[in-house]
């Protein structure tokens, strides 16, 4: 049995979830990875970093995923860190959203992550401490038009996690935070740029330049940069940051 700490990462096949999984492995964590198809990421990380990696296939809204993740983590020695990540919801104007849109997105963005957290927190309590982090979005503080589901439900999850931080700190030394990216160079951002370019009948580079002009650092963030900050918040190096949503956004949002 390895004496390395175990980290559980959902939404681990691409983007910031995959980058964080790699960074946690680089720092010596064994991993339980979850996504619809986690095997490729698991094989790559196992080969690159020589850590134990268990792949658990499933979407975060699936009711049995939490129990399967908890079982896999327990078999490896018990989870000490948890990154909550999932895909984004449909992009629609507020008045076009249906009850079904809201209920489906609520399952994915709020119920599913909290179910996974509930399943894994007892392992952290048994180990006298742990770290929970959710990938959020800068739009919790500065909402965008057209993504009402994301604006509203990410805010709901962040406030639920802040409540958990209040309760789990005294009970078991568990630190709970959210880390909100701004414009980070992922496939999702590239898809958005392509979509806006088609809608406006302009080049993708014009959309990109327009976006960069809004960022004080005048560049996109990187998944790897995000992952380094996430890995700190998920590690014992972080001994006092809890109950926060921290922005990784190049100075984009300056609101409190």
Image (tube, grey):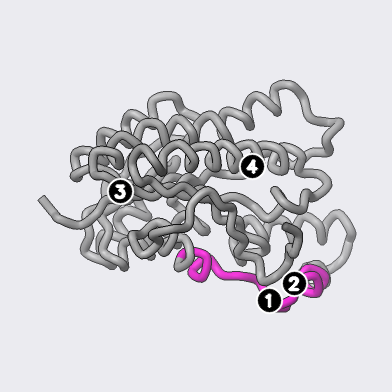
Dot placed on the residue nearer the N-terminal end, 2 or 4: 4
- Quadrant of the drawing holding the C terminus: bottom right
**What residue is shown at x 42% (from left), y 36% (from top)?**
117
Frontmost of labels 1 and 2 is: 2
Q: Secondary structure at mark 1?
A: loop
List the residue tagged with mark 3: 80
CA separation in Å, label 1 and label 2? 7 Å
Per the rendered image, the range of residues in magenta is 209-227
Q: Secondary structure at mark 2?
A: loop
- Residues at badges 2 and 3 in contact (C-beta under 8 Å)? no
Residue 219: mark = 1
**Relative side of 12 to 236, left or right:** right
Q: Secondary structure at mark 3?
A: strand
**What residue is shown at x 64% (from left), y 42% (from top)?**
154
Vertically, is 96 above or below 19? above
Frontmost of labels 1 and 3 is: 3
Dot placed on the residue nearer the N-terminal end, 3 or 4: 3
**What residue is shown at x 62% (from left), y 61% (from top)?**
247
Q: Secondary structure at mark 4?
A: helix
CA separation in Å, label 3 and label 4? 24 Å
Residue 152 in the image: state x and y as whole percent.
71, 38
Q: Residues within 10 Å of mark 2 (few under 14, many from 20)?
A: some
Dot placed on the residue nearer the N-terminal end, 2 or 3: 3
List the residue tagged with mark 2: 215
- Residues at badges 1 and 2 in contact (C-beta under 8 Å)? yes
């Amino acid at each position: 049995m390895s004496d390395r700490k175990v980290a559980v990462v959902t939404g681990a096949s691409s983007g910031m979830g995959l980058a964080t999984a790699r960074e946690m492995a680089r720092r010596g964590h064994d991993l339980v990875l979850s996504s619809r198809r986690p095997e490729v990421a698991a094989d790559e990380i196992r080969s690159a970093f020589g850590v134990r990696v268990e792949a658990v296939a499933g979407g975060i809204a699936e009711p049995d995923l939490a129990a399967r993740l908890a079982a896999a983590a327990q078999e490896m020695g018990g989870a000490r860190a948890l990154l909550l990540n999932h895909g984004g919801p449909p992009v629609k104007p507020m008045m076009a959203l249906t009850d079904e849109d809201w209920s489906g997105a609520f399952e994915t963005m709020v119920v599913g992550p909290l179910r996974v957290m509930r399943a894994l927190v007892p392992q952290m309590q048994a180990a006298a401490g742990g770290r929970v982090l959710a990938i959020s979005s800068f739009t919790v503080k500065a909402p965008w038009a057209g993504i009402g589901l994301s604006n509203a439900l990410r805010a709901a999850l962040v406030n639920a996690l802040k409540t958990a931080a209040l309760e789990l700190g005294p009970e078991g030394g568990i630190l709970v935070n959210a880390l909100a990216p701004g414009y980070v160079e992922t496939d999702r951002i590239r898809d958005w740029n392509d979509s806006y370019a088609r809608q406006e009948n302009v080049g993708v580079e014009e959309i990109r330049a327009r976006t960069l002009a809004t960022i004080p650092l005048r560049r996109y963030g990187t998944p790897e940069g995000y992952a380094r900050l996430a890995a700190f918040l998920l590690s014992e190096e972080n001994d006092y940051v809890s109950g926060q949503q921290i922005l990784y956004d190049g100075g984009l949002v300056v609101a409190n």
